[in-house]
Image (cartoon, coloured by chain):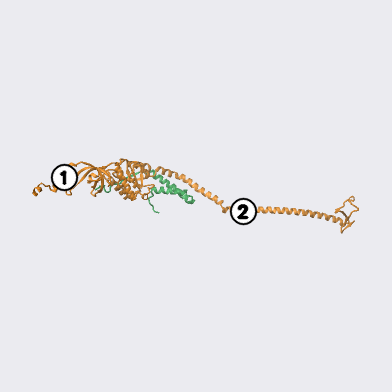
Chain colours: A green, B orange
Amino acid sequence: MTKKKETFEDMLKRLEQISHLLESENIGLDESLKLYEEGIILSKKCYAKLEEAELKITELKKQNEFNPE
Amino acid sequence: MVEKETHNALTVSEISSLIKQSLEDEFSNVSVVGEISNFKAHYSGHWYFTLKDASAQINCTMWKGLNSYVFFKPQDGMKVIISGRVTVYPPRGNYQIDIRSMKPAGEGELQAAFERLKKKLAAEGLFDEVYKKPIPEYPNRIGIVTAINGAAFQDMISVAKRRYPLLEIIIASSKVQGEGAAEEIALRIQELNKLPGIDLLIVGRGGGSLEDLWAFNEEIVARAIFNSSVPVISAVGHEIDFTISDFAADLRAPTPSAAMELATPDINEIFAFINEFPYTFAKNMDDIINVRFDKLNSIKNSYGFRTTRDLVKNRSQFLDNLFYKFDNTFSKKILKYRTEAELLSKHLESFDTNRILKKGFALVKQKDKFIKRAAELDASGKMIIKFFDNEITLN
């Protein structure tokens, strides 16, 4: 498994996926327990990330200074 | 004669010069209304076209420094009012109008230009639904093309802060009206497309007059939006303002603030979802467990198990029936045996008489009855005397 940096989007998507899986009927009991645990951990991580989030603004400098000529 | 005439005659240059002087003095400041045709924007930045009406036409030039003040890109067929001066160019023997300023002959002209471009781009498929890219649900980086000092940008920032502070915003500032605005907007869209990791672009500006918003009705902007590989939300002016950019974009937002709302998920909803997870999913786990209980019960009651159980039930019933039958037959038999026993015992009783007879007593029988007293005897009737060994009948 690649240790790629997990984005908030990835985590939230996974959480949503877990939520759908847990709502589906054909899921094994053992698997659902594992998913539940993963979900709890993920929701804590997401929460922390949201709490400390701060909007980042970067200005893209004009690469080729615009000139109609 | 010839010499004199020659002496009085003007050279071509002389007459040209006189014409030039005369025309340029007479028409140093004219205002002309006409329809543009053969419009050419030269690479140098100068504009060349013909201004015409039903029965005449005149060549026109507009130099680069001046045409940059024209807020729209002229199109063939557009009716404009120009002001300028007539110039004569002797080497070619022609005249033209050197244009100082140009404006549409009315708001209707802009509307018509808008419709023409819209029709043209629509025919090319630039507005087709099939090309519309989906807007990402959770964007990481949003590129914005607008004026960094504009109110629209500040509005978008405050919406982003409130709704989704996880966001990174890359602002590619651009002029949004006037000289070269359309070209710069298009260029900034292209530049943002070259940056890695941009999920979405918002291209727009705040409200203004039709003239102010015109850059977003230019073909070059529409094409840059259409060619963007990153999805684009167009956000120009107010709710009521529709621009060509709106049609070319993947999504139209009524205002820049609305664009940021459309671009971002609401952090409060995410909080709610995350906070609820332990509760809803504890409940889900309950459900999952209950479902298993139900399943267990339904298996217990399933046909397979039921038939086995019924089999046992049926056998037991069969046994009950059997017992009942046995019982019935036995009691009948018992009854029968009892009757037989009774008969037998009567028979046995009779053996007692035999014993007496053996000793030498005799019994008198008349009309099948044993006579027990002399008074019962009919002495004249038929009678049977029973001895041990035999019976004698007396008549």
User: Up-down: is B245 above or below B353?
Assistant: above
Task: Report in which chain the residue with disc 1 lies.
Answer: B
Amino acid type, mark 2:
Val
Q: CA distance from mark 2 to mark 1?
A: 127 Å
* Residue positioned most to the right: B380
Placement of the N terminus of chain A among the 4 image quadrants: bottom left
* Residue positioned most to the bottom: B389
> Which mark sits nearer the N-terminus, 2 or 1?
1
User: What residue did someone put label 1 on?
Assistant: B19
Question: Based on the displayed image, in which of its 4 quarters is residue B260 positioned?
Answer: top left
Towards the viewer: B150 or B29: B29
User: Up-down: is B394 above or below B4?
Assistant: below
SS category of the residue bearing label 2: helix
| Picture coordinates of residue B394, whole percent (x, y) | 90, 56
Q: Which mark is residue B161?
A: none
| Picture coordinates of residue B368, whole percent (x, y) | 85, 54
Mark 1 burial class by Cα count in 10 Å: few <14, some 14-19, many 20+: some
Residue B262 in sight here: yes
Q: Which mark is residue B312?
A: 2
Mark 2 burial class by Cα count in 10 Å: few <14, some 14-19, many 20+: few
Disc nearest the viewer among 2 and 1: 1
SS category of the residue bearing label 1: helix
Question: Based on the displayed image, in which of its 4 quarters is residue B149 positioned?
Answer: top left
In the rendered structure, the answer to whether residue A35 lies left or right of residue B169 reads: right
Residue B169 in sight here: no
